[in-house]
Every structure is written in C-alpha cells, then in structure tokens.
Image (cartoon, rainbow, N blue to C red):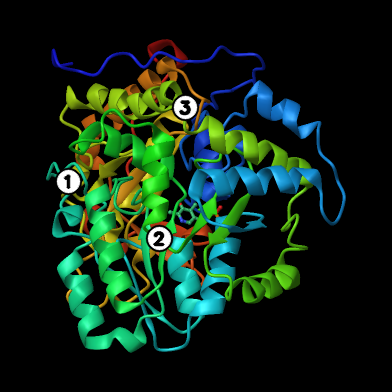
Amino acid sequence: MSPDAPPLPLEPFRIKAVERLHLPTREEREKALARAGLNLFNLTSEEVFIDLLTDSGTSAMSDRQWAALMTGDESYAGSRNFVEFERTVQDLTGFPFVIPTHQGRAAEHLLMSALLHPGETVPNNMHFDTTQAHVLRQGARPLNLAIPEAYDPQVDHPFKGNMDVPRLEELLRSNRKNVPLVMMTLTNNTGGGQPASLENLRAISAVCRAQKVPFYLDMCRWAENAYFIREREHGQEGRSIREIGRECFGLADGATMSAKKDGLVNIGGFVATRDAALVPRLKETLITFEGFPTYGGLARRDLAAMAVGLLEATDLDYLEHRIGQVRYLASLLDAEGIPYVHPPGGHGLYLDAHRFLPHLSASELPGQSLVVEIYREGAVRTCEVGGVMFGSEKPAPGTPPPLELVRLAIPRRVYTASHLHYVAETLKAVWRRRASIGGLRIIEAPERLRHFLAKFGPSPKRVSTTGSTTITRGKARSRANM
Ligand SMILES: *Cc1c(COP(=O)(O)O)cnc(C)c1O
C-alpha cells in the first residue's frame, strides 16, 4: 500500500448478533456454478462466502431498528407507524406528499405510469436497470446524459455522477414537449456509485424550472451523495448531511427511493412529491398494485424500522466507515494494479472488466466471465454491470458503449475489514491467472432485465481457439492459504 493509503476503516459499531458463514469447498463451488448456469443470481446463499452481489436490502439493522419492529401497529389504515414514517421523510426531504411502497421499483412504477406516454424521452444521468425497464414499459425512451468523464473508468473526477447540462438544455430546446420529466440518480449506481455535485443539481433544477419540466431524484443513495458533496465541494465541508440533503431535495419536485439502500432496511421504499395534483394518480396505482396508502405493500413494523434507518444513514461516523470501506478495498488492489473505476464509489468498488480481461471482446462478456471466476476462486459473489445487464437495449445515437464493470457492492454494517482483506486476496488470485480466463456467451435469456434470469456457457470463440469447451480453471485454493 502507498503511504497515503486510506486508514483501516474502524467499525463504529459492535456486533450483537452473528450469522454463521461457511466457505464452500472448490468442488461445491464448481457444482454450484454448473447448477446456476454460470449466473450468480441463481446461487443459494449457502453457496456464497462473502456476498457482494448487491448492497440492496442486505444491510444489518441496528438494535434500535429491531426494537422499532416491535412497535408495529398493524392497523390496515392510519397506523401510527405510517404517521411517524411520513413525518420523518417530510423532515428529511421537505416533500409534503409521501407514499410508501414495498421497494424502489414499485415507486418507479407509480411515478412512470403516472407521467410517461409512448414515444417520450426520459433523461437521467444514467438509468439504473429497473428505472430503465419502467421507462421502456411505458413505451418511452431512456436517455443517459452523464458527463463524458463518467464513461472513462480511468479518469479521476470528483463528481462523475454529474449530468451534462448543455446536452439537457439542447434536448429541452429542441424537444421540450416530448420530455415528461428529468431524473437524476444519486449516486450514479450504473456508472460506478459516483456522486453528483450540488452545483450540477442547481444547474439542472434551473433548466427544468425555466422549461417547466418536473425534476425528480432517484434518491436511493442520497446520504452517500451528500457525504461526497460535504467532502469534495467548495464551501460544503462544515454542513451536516441532513442540511445538504435538504438543499438537494429543495431543488427537485419529488423523488423515488429504495430504502433498501440509504434507508438501512431489508425491504421498503417510497415516492415523495410536492405535486398535489399527481398524488391521486400515484395512489390509484398504489392501491391496485401495492396496498393502501398508509402501508404500501409493507408490514407497518417495516415502516417503523425504515423511519429509524433513514435517520441512521445520515450519521457521519456511519458514512465515514461505509465509504472508508470502499476506499480501503480499493487501496488493497492498488498494490497489484487491478483496474477499477476511479475514484472508488460510495457503495461499492467497480472493476473495469475490459482492462482486467483485455484479450476478451465485448461479445465474449468479460464482465460476466470475471464474476464467474471471482466466485470460482473464493466463493465471493459479485455482480456484472455491463453488456449482460444493459446490452440488450439499443443505445441512443451518440451514446458511448456501456461500461463493462463488475460491481463489488458492500452491504452496510455487515462485513469487517478482515472480510475485505479476504476479498482482495481472492481478486489478486484471479488477477494473476487472468490471461488464461476465457469468455462466455448467453445460452438463454428473457427480453427485459435479462441479467437476473440468463444462463451462460463458454463462448464459441474460445472453443475454436483453445480447443477446449470449458473455461480455464484456476488452481485449487485451500483454506490454509487464505
Ligand atoms: C436499487 C435501485 C433501484 C430500485 O430499487 P429496488 O428497491 O431494488 O426495487 C432504483 N434505482 C437505483 C439507483 C437503485 O440502486
């Protein structure tokens, strides 16, 4: 590690309940891969040692959240847990209307089905997979307008999650009637967990207000985004996370939220807005698909845990540890020059699969291949964010090809620094044998959100060049050398 390496992330909590982990043997891992059709979404959790598939709904709840669960008032209508939850969201965001949903995509469903029409265009810095699916489902077109730096994993930029405001202005100038809303994803999950600056949000807000276009935030990781603003933006260092958040929300007309991220719960979400006229339409879909507006598809005790979690996510000690973990993991990889998206993101580290496996072409699915090899090496489960997740959609003209990334998402308050060391050792072992890693191809897949259900096999190209039908296997690893 270099002398300016980040400090060991010191856990600002102690452990009160533990869950047993088991490292599957090499043979068990091979069997699991074969059974799963090389799609790690098909693994059972017993087949995984360290699970970095997602940070969504995988957080450890605090003692206070568990205590809040016991205060559940399970009334169908008018539960006091809803009243508390609603007040918490109103206080944090300033949005007067709050509609709970079972998770983020349900909030997207409500908002997109109320606002979009076929043929319209929805700009975003970068659409997350479910957001994109909901735009497409309404017959509309998702348009990613992230700044050019967002597409270069090597470039260091403090706010790679920013939107290209001149391009947004241009779009609205030429085609305002066709844009039902503008969205910003905080942080930019698809682009490496990168934040957007307050300055950028102010500029977007001004453009939207001038053109009278609704401006919505995908606020899944708003507290992490606020942490980066506090750390990196001029004049913001003395402010609290909640103050910065309030300013961000004040620039927007509403937001969708997956509380499985910065709500520190295992299930829950909401849509919030200032637009009173929109609320009846949102509630109609809510009641059809989710439930009554005072529970939105959740147990009322879930609302109680969410109200506590939303506040805990704004704690500076917590955020310092969380974002410190991602940086620490990055610093462990620097020793070997393992390529990842710079700078490290808020909720995870994103490996650059094209640079990790430069001998594979995009059609050989280097990201998916890397995900499989990382599991094979150390039973660490990660997630491809690249050609498999986004490749089935035709990119809009002028958009760069999708990034080919492997996301190591860090669940909140779950793993220790030793776990991160284990992950780094696993990645180094894969890195050392990278030249022998072959590509993959999709054997079967549904049309939309295909990464969840696809099955994979070795790429035909490899078969013809190596004469082997299986991708190369790494050396067996014993427990002793980890
Ligand atoms: C997770 C996520 C969603 C969807 O939320 P779910 O709770 O998984 O349905 C939407 N946008 C972003 C940026 C996300 O990370």
Q: Amino acid at mark 3?
A: Asp
The quadrant the N terminus occupies is: top left
Question: Mark 2 to mark 3: distance in Å?
Answer: 23 Å
Which numbered disc, 1 or 3, marks the residue that appears first in the sequence? 3
Q: Which residue is mark 1?
A: 355
Q: Which mark is residue 315?
A: 3
Q: Amino acid at mark 1?
A: Arg
- Indicate the secondary structure of the residue bearing disc 2: loop
Q: Please give left or right for residue 85 compared with residue 370 in the image.
A: right
Category of crowding for the residue at label 1, using alpha-carbon neighbours closer than 10 angstroms: few (below 14), some (14–19), many (at least 20): some
Which numbered disc, 1 or 2, marks the residue that appears first in the sequence? 2
Category of crowding for the residue at label 2, using alpha-carbon neighbours closer than 10 angstroms: few (below 14), some (14–19), many (at least 20): many
User: Which label lies toward us, 1 or 3?
Assistant: 3
Q: Which residue is mark 2?
A: 252
Which numbered disc, 2 or 3, marks the residue that appears first in the sequence? 2
Q: Amino acid at mark 2?
A: Ala
Residue 372 appearing in the image: no
